Amino acid sequence: MKPGRGDLAMLTSVFIWGNTFPTAKYVLTVLPPPVYAASRYLLAALTLMLVLALRGGLQPPRRQDLPGLAALGFVGITLMQLLWTNALDLTTASKGAILVSVAPIFALLISSFRGQRLSVSAWAGVALSFAGVFLVINNSVSRITLGGGTLTGDLLFLAVAFCWANYSVFATPYLARLGALRTTAWSMLFGALMLSPALGFGIGDIDWGAITPGIIACYLFTAFVAGALGYLFWYAGIARLGIARSVIYSYLIPVFALLSAVTFLGEHVSPVQFAGAAVVITGLVLTRISPVKTA
């Protein structure tokens, strides 16, 4: 089957999100993590609400959907973005992208606690992915080296993956009922509003003279392109390809992030970490092709 518009949309989305890690890392050299997270997601949420308005879908959700959308916004935007920006400030963009890519593994584990039965091969994929995570963090196959200064950032990125997994699992009924764009826009708006008080933490510490045109361009990229358009391309791809055919593209996010971080930030990725990334992705693919049944 020849690649079509759905494939192009998915490739565009994962390319954008992969490049967000090193781009945001650069912005964080000037902006404090809370200020960066709060301001860029306010802009992203307003952009998605504008898209909704242009498509004639700006009417508020039903009252009974509001608490759930607010909870999704808190987990998927407020909490996750505070963790993400602080994690990226503490560790490398390349490691962060690899660690966040285990979110589908957490989603699978959450689903198993909710009644889905995993096959032996799926459990093998879970174990393989976490073995890859250990290699990425430990950066050695011969000794334990977990005491490095970036361990806190690495663990925060695993918490980010856990938040994204919860958002993905518990957003499912809202996506089916309200549609992907409406669910994302409203939950992002709620999450961004709850995140907005973080603007007061560190805004007085910004060195405004250090904000160069390059920093501004990278900030706008992460706010409008990654924060808003990335989601639009992602859901446009899902609409054309379906979930099953779309999810495989998410495995390319750490690949693009690794290439970008090495090229533009000069980050060093060791052979052990490259091997760990390959093990993580192999585990993800194994869980994806394994049957999952409802108990």
Image (cartoon, rainbow, N blue to C red):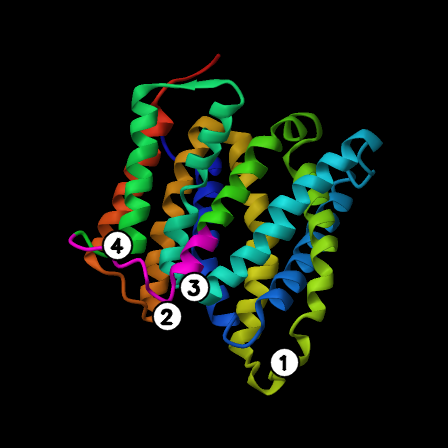
Q: Nearer the viewer, mark 4 or mark 2?
A: 4
Name the spot of residue 59 as percent of width and height, x first: 83, 38
Q: Nearer the viewer, mark 2 or mark 1?
A: 1
Distance from disc 1 to disc 3, alpha carbons, whole Å, reads 22 Å
Image-quadrant location for residue 71:
top right
Counting residues from the start of the chain, the first of labels 1 and 3 encountered is: 3
Identify the residue under disc 1. Answer: 205
Identify the residue under disc 2. Answer: 265
Are discs 3 and 2 less than 8 Å apart at CB? yes
What residue is shown at x 55% (from left), y 49% (from top)? 230
Distance from disc 4 to disc 3, alpha carbons, whole Å, reads 17 Å
Are discs 4 and 1 less than 8 Å apart at CB? no
What residue is shown at x 55% (from left), y 81% (from top)? 212
Q: Nearer the viewer, mark 4 or mark 3?
A: 4
Counting residues from the start of the chain, the first of labels 4 and 3 encountered is: 3
Q: Residues within 10 Å of mark 1 (few under 14, many from 20)?
A: few
Number of numbered discs on residues: 4
What label does residue 22 carry, if any?
A: 3
Which residue is nearer to you in this view: 92 or 210?
92
SS class, disc 2: helix
In the rendered structure, which amino acid carries the disc numbered 4? Gln
